[in-house]
Image (cartoon, rainbow, N blue to C red):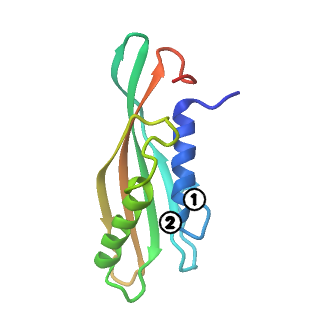
Amino acid sequence: MADTIREKIIAAFTTRAASLSTLAVERAKRSIDESSSRFVSVWDGEDQLIESRYGQEKLQFPLAIECIWKHGATNPSVAANALMGEIINTMIGVGKDRTFGALVDQITAATKSPQYPQDGSDYTSLTVIFLINYTTVAGNPYAV
C-alpha cells in the first residue's frame, strides 16, 4: 500500500534530521546509550482539521525532534541553546526546502523545551516541536 501524504512528510522530516546525529534517527522511541553521540528521535502528534473546502482538507499536526545527549563539561543551558539553533537551521533554515518536496504548505518551529539534568546526571534533552500544515484531497489521505 502507498504511503499517506502525512507519512511521506514524516519520512522526509526524519531523513533531514539524520544530520543531527551520528546514530540512526528513531521514530517514537527514547533511548540513551553510553556513547557521546546525540540520540535523536522524531515524534508525530495528532492531526487537526484547519479547514475543509472545495474538496480539500487543510490539516495541521505537531512533529517533534527530541535530542538526548551527554553534555560533558559544557554548561547544559549553553549546549541546549546551541542545539536549538542547529535544529532550526537544519530543518527549516535559509535555503532549505520548507515544503519537503511540495508536501508541506507551512512549517513553524513552535516550541523549544530543554530539560536540564538532575544532579549527578550528564544527560540533557531538548525537544523542538514544529507545526506542520498540509493539504489532502477530502477523503483521500494519499493525494495532494
Work out whether 107 lies above or below 119: above
- In the displayed structure, does residue 18 sit left or right of residue 63? right
Q: Are marks 1 and 2 in contact (CB under 8 Å)?
A: yes
- Residue 78 occupies which quadrant of the picture? bottom left
Residue type highlighted by circle 2: Leu
Instruction: Identify residue for label 2.
Output: 20
Mark yes or no: residue 56 visible: yes
Give the percent coordinates (x, y) of residue 29.
Answer: 54, 55
User: In the rendered image, is residue 27 in sight?
Assistant: no
Residue linked to disc 1: 25
Residue 40 is left or right of residue 84, and the answer is right
Q: Nearer the viewer, residue 13 or 41?
A: 13
Q: Is residue 114 above or below residue 5?
A: below
Q: Nearer the viewer, mark 1 or mark 2?
A: 2
Residue at the (45%, 64%) spot, across then down: 67
Query: What amino acid is found at the position of numbered circle 1 in the picture?
Result: Val
The residue sitting at the top extreme is 54
- Identify the element where label 2 is drawn: helix
Residue located farthest toward the front when viewing the structure as drawn: 95
Can you name the residue that lies furthest to the right here?
1
Position in image of residue 132 (x %, y %): 39, 39
Instruction: Give the residue drawn at x 46%, y 47%.
Output: 97
